[in-house]
């Protein structure tokens, strides 16, 4: 099953009711506190795959933006941050981890 939320309160409620194997966070989304949600997710699901997605990691981002996102991702305990738009070839190796 896939859960998708439109606000932080709904996300927190779902995190309290369910355990997850994977989560993807759009780090460029300004209507949600995705960094806090990612930290909460990592606390409640320590063995799960936690993916951050950001346009700053792609060709649009400069080195300083990439570095800032990577540092924030480490603090939020994200497993990896991938560039947006998301490409299948960059996501596939990470999804392979949960199939095993």
Image: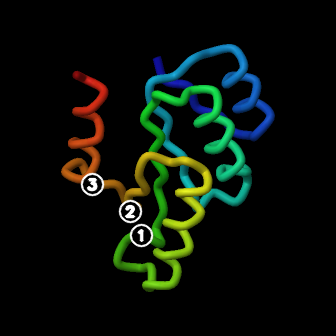
Point out residue 51 in the picture as x, y percentages from the top left corner.
45, 45
Q: Which residue is mark 2?
A: 83
Q: Residue 30: which quarter of the image? A: bottom right
Q: Residue 14: which quarter of the image? A: top right
| Helix, strand or loop for disc 3 | loop
Q: Residue 31: which quarter of the image? A: bottom right
Give the mark toward the camera: 1 or 3.
1
Point out residue 53 in the picture as x, y percentages from the top left corner.
46, 55
Q: Are marks 1 and 3 in contact (CB under 8 Å)?
A: no
Report how far apart the C-alphas of labels 1 and 2 lie in the structure. Answer: 5 Å
Q: Is residue 77 above or below residue 82?
A: above
Determine the residue positioned at 28% across, 46% down.
91
Q: Is residue 56 above or below residue 9?
A: below
| Helix, strand or loop for disc 2 | strand
Q: Which residue is mark 1?
A: 57
Report how far apart the C-alphas of labels 1 and 3 lie in the structure. Answer: 12 Å
Determine the residue positioned at 56% across, 74% down.
68
Q: Are marks 2 and 3 in contact (CB under 8 Å)?
A: yes
Q: Which mark is residue 87?
A: 3
| Helix, strand or loop for disc 1 | helix
Q: Are marks 1 and 2 in contact (CB under 8 Å)?
A: yes
Left or right of 93, for residue 61:
right
């Amino acid at each position: 099953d896939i859960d998708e939320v439109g606000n932080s309160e709904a996300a927190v409620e779902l995190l309290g009711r369910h355990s997850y194997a994977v989560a993807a966070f759009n780090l460029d989304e300004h209507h949600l506190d995705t960094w806090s949600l990612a930290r909460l997710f990592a606390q409640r699901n320590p063995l799960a795959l936690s993916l951050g997605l950001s346009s700053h990691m792609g060709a649009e981002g400069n080195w300083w933006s990439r570095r800032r996102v990577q540092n924030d991702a480490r603090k939020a305990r994200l497993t990896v941050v991938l560039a947006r738009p998301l490409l299948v070839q960059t996501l596939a190796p990470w999804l392979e981890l949960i199939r095993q």
